[in-house]
Image (spheres, coloured by chain):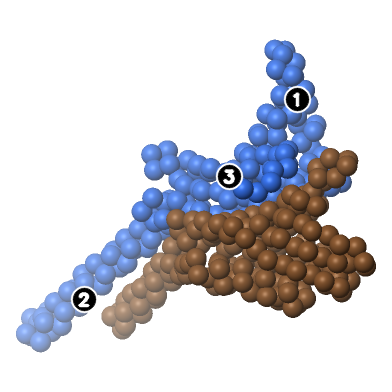
Chain colours: A blue, B brown
Amino acid sequence: MAPMTEIEALKVTEVKLSKNFYGMVLTVVFAILLFVVQGCSKSTPACDNGKTIKAVVNIVSQDFKNDLSEIVGLGRPGMELTDEEWKTMRAGMVIDLENIREHSFDEAEGKRKCAANLMIVSGGSKELIPVSYVSEINKDTGELKVALSGLEEYKKSKTAPVMLPE
Amino acid sequence: MQKIYLKQEVSFLLILAAIAGISGCKESSLQFTAITENDITAMIDDVERATRDKDSDGVIKHMAPFVIINVSMETPAGMQRIQMSRDQYKELLQKVFSKASLHEYRYENARITISDDRRSAVVETDIIEHIIMEGKETNTTTHEKTVVEIINGKLLVTSLDALVVNL
């Protein structure tokens, strides 16, 4: 076997270096991709994300259940609304969100401020309630936390006595 | 040859990373426009002008297509509340505008509360109206609570609660 000339040796070194260089670039690119995918997957889901909507609907459903429990049970022990009774009542009710809007997203806090029309269809009547909610991911547990407002105000306004303006 | 393939691969992955970065986190790069008190005042003034001109479109244009309108009033049968869509409200306005021989309208006690993120505002006003319709004179005071939001860069009413307090 003939010995390599100086030029041939240089070419071999260049190919080796190129391979190393592109290998490094590939690793960096993959690292960036992983960072992007992981970073985004942990961010607070959008206002119209299925998980967020479900969390809002659950809050409303629970609130209605509590209200009904108070009426049915009249505060007496053993007279509370059972889960089975609530499931039967809830089956004929549609609770959903319409026209979901995002007001703001605080990246540092991971909080999304959202607004929507809460739709409740029950007994053939449809009611729309303007609501707003703040969603955030618990950094430790990764759990989605949603705080809803507008429902209490709406319930108060439904029963509020007529008051003259100041 | 191998070098060219590697170059292409790297370019492709860089493009992929850029797309992932842009699409994956696009929600965080939304551009917001803030609500100011002057914007709200201009809007209230414009609604007042449109009402005086019997211009239902001029009133409706400030409302989001999905606006929730609740009108409550005390009746002999107790408190009654009607929920209306934007189209139903427009129909009602057109009816009043066409039948009223006199319609005096003014607002008082405007209170504007802008949210911390300046994306929404709550506006409370007392609307004083004097209407003569089909020979019948009516004086009303209505307490209105309105929510205004920025929707697609526009300032629009997304909910309106009107409580007729004085018939």
Foreground pick, B112 / A84: B112
What's the distance in space between the residues labelled 3 and 1, CA to CA?
23 Å
Residue in the picture at 70% in, 17% down? A75
Q: Callout 3: helix, strand or loop?
A: strand
User: Label 3 crowding class (10 Å Cα cut-off): few <14, some 14-19, many 20+?
Assistant: some
Q: Is residue B69 left or right of residue A41?
A: right
Amino acid beneath label 3: Ser
Amino acid at dot 1: Ile
Q: Nearer the viewer, residue B114 or A50?
A: B114
Give the labeled residue for mark 2.
A18
Name the side, left or right, on which A34 lies relative to A70: left
| Label 1 residue SS | helix
Q: Chain of mark 3?
A: A
Residue at 51 percent across and 53 percent down: it is A113
Residue that mark 1 sits on: A71
Q: Is residue B63 visible?
A: yes
Task: Relative to A145, say whether B92 is above or below.
Answer: below
Q: Position of residue A79 (x, y in %)?
A: 75, 16
Q: Which mark is residue B22?
A: none
